[in-house]
Amino acid sequence: MENFSYQKKLKMIWEWALAKYEKGERDPNNYFSESTLKELSDIGLNTMDVYDYVEDYVSRGEPDFETFLLVSSVRKDYLFLAQGGNKTTKLIDSASLPAKDAKVKGIAWLPRIMYKAWAKLRGQLPSDTMYGCSGDRSFLKEYNIHPADFLRIAWAYEEDESKLVDWVISQKSQ
């Protein structure tokens, strides 16, 4: 995918997926051509990265395209800056994520979303796990944090979980 205008191509891919979903097509394996899958892969994305966001947008009214673009941009940047353009083939096991009710400093969901964010950054989320799902969005709204901003901070504090936790706590009062 051309770097200068990748956002335009990503918007076309989003709109294509949105139209298919709105027509009732629910099998994500039939959404994209090989060339489109390659374009997505070139920036660290896959079918489910698009499908999950489109599905939630249609069924819940969020996240919108702009949120999808911002989150995807953080993943793209991480791929090229932190991973040197080298994609991982090792996906996490969703069962290994902290439970939804797991807490850190008394905050439920925070351990889970931290590990999902790190897996999203690294391209390690399996197709059955979405970064930015309704549970993530509810948590992030409560703390006044945009999903893309959380990813950026998770990247910044990738080596220091306690700083990420403290940053999240500081956001609730703002």
Image: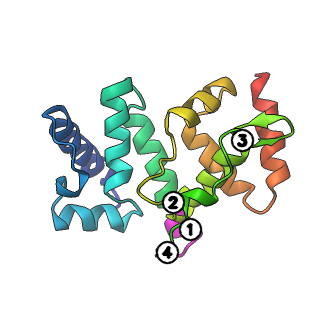
Three-letter amino acid code of the residue under disc 1: Leu
Which residue is rendered at x = 31% and y = 38% of the image? 54
Helix, strand or loop under label 3: helix
Q: Earlier in the sequence, mark 3 or mark 1?
A: 1
Q: Residues within 10 Å of mark 1 (few under 14, many from 20)?
A: few
Three-letter amino acid code of the residue under disc 2: Asp
Image quarter of residue 110? top right
Image spot of residue 171 (x, y percent): 75, 30
130 versus 145 height, above or below: below
Q: Earlier in the sequence, mark 2 or mark 4?
A: 2
CA–CA distance between discs 3 and 1? 26 Å
Say which residue label 4 marks. 88
CA–CA distance between discs 2 and 4? 15 Å
| For discs 3 and 2, the disc positioned in front in the rendered view | 3
Helix, strand or loop under label 2: helix
> Do the residues under discs 1 and 2 have CB atoms within 8 angstroms?
yes
Residue 83 within the segment the image draws in magenta: yes
113 versus 134 height, above or below: below
Image spot of residue 160 (x, y percent): 81, 58
Q: Earlier in the sequence, mark 3 or mark 2?
A: 2
